[in-house]
Amino acid sequence: MSKIQGQRVCGPNLGTYSFDEFDEKKQELARLKEQATSFWEQEKAVLVAHGIQECCNILDLACGPGVVTRKIKSLVPDSHVTGVDLNESLLQVAINDSQQDGCETPTFRKADCTNLPFEASSFDFVYARFLFQHLSTPVTAVAEIKRVLKPGGRVLIVDVDDRDLDVTPACSSFEQLTRAAGVFQTEGGGNRHVGRTLDGLLKSHHFANVNRQVEVMSSEQIGLESFFRMTTQFKIEQLPEDLAAEMRELLPEMRRQLASVNATISAGIHVASGLAC
Ligand SMILES: C[S@@+](CC[C@H](N)C(=O)[O-])C[C@H]1O[C@@H](n2cnc3c(N)ncnc32)[C@H](O)[C@@H]1O
């Protein structure tokens, strides 16, 4: 996000997420990697339940640093797995990390999810993880997914809905930050309530067997500090500078409050799937 008159604006077609504009890139990369590994067993079960399998052509759309792409390749090594993203820095991380794996690796390439460089009917399975909340025209991305899926191929979209982000007992400064981040993301064209819309989006593009469920992840699984860092603290960097400074000042008190009441943070992640026909 370039900082124009106190606002942060992402690059062309990157929606409301631009890795290159984070001031603390190392920290953000570590967060993306932690988010991709901490709940992998739960995520793997979701992928399997939704039909990911061997000998398929699989697309990880907006793969970021490719951690999940590589995990998918390990899960179904006889499948061809491609990760695409519009951000070159993250793609380079994905390529470097996968070269170090020293075994069968996914293919990574630059692509815009609203204009994919693939023939129609190329993939058996398309996965989009934490992408849709950042898109101002999610319908264009869904249409592209539909186009590149083979008939009978499946899409699986995983994303947030802040209605299902909860802290117990309540913490006013946490809620203030969550609200500010949601408002700012909406102003940038994104949607932190996208989760509840995902099944409707798929139905409107005539996917069959559409379903949506909510997977709950909680700080009880990985500890309050890790969960807070992964789901909440990074949002400060995405705020306009004056608001970010205000929120940064609230952080120590927020942490103290959360720890003193032994709070639990939980996030309901919406999981929607459908069959192309
Ligand atoms: C929050 S990150 C999620 C990355 C990855 N899926 C994960 O879960 O770790 C959102 C990703 O969407 C990518 N992105 C945003 N707009 C895009 C577009 N139009 N086409 C492709 N990727 C895009 C960003 O570069 C970023 O890597």
Image (spheres, helix red, strand yellow):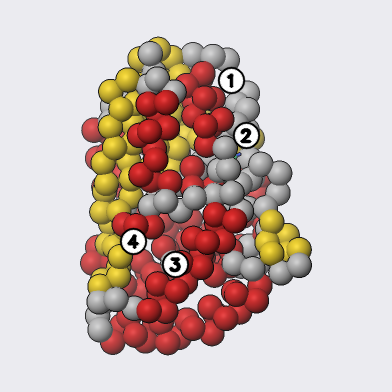
How many C-alpha atoms fall within 10 Å of the one at disc 2: few (<14), some, or many (≥20)?
A: some
**Disc number placed over residue 165 in the picture, else none:** 4
Residue identified by numbered label 1: 118
The answer to whether marks 3 and 4 mark residues whose Cβ atoms lie closer than 8 Å is yes
Amino acid type, mark 1: Phe
Is 115 positioned to the left or the right of 267 in the image? Answer: right
Q: CA distance from mark 4 to mark 2?
A: 29 Å
Image spot of residue 216 (x, y percent): 25, 54
How many C-alpha atoms fall within 10 Å of the one at disc 3: few (<14), some, or many (≥20)?
A: some
Image spot of residue 37 (x, y percent): 37, 53
User: Could you tell me which residue is drawn at 76 percent across and 67 percent down?
Assistant: 5
Q: CA distance from mark 2 to mark 1?
A: 11 Å
Image spot of residue 63 (x, y percent): 51, 41
Q: Earlier in the sequence, mark 1 or mark 4?
A: 1
> Within the image, what quadrant is residue 217 found in?
bottom left
Amino acid type, mark 2: Asp
How many C-alpha atoms fall within 10 Å of the one at disc 1: few (<14), some, or many (≥20)?
A: few
Amino acid type, mark 3: Thr
149 shown above or below 258 = above
185 shown above or below 219 = above
Residue identified by numbered label 2: 112
Residue identified by numbered label 3: 178
Q: Secondary structure at mark 2?
A: loop
Q: Earlier in the sequence, mark 3 or mark 2?
A: 2
Q: Is residue 154 in view from this perspective?
A: no
Q: Earlier in the sequence, mark 3 or mark 4?
A: 4
Is 192 positioned to the left or the right of 99 in the image? Answer: left
Q: Earlier in the sequence, mark 2 or mark 1?
A: 2
Q: Which of labels 1 and 3 is toward the front?
A: 3
Q: Earlier in the sequence, mark 4 or mark 2?
A: 2
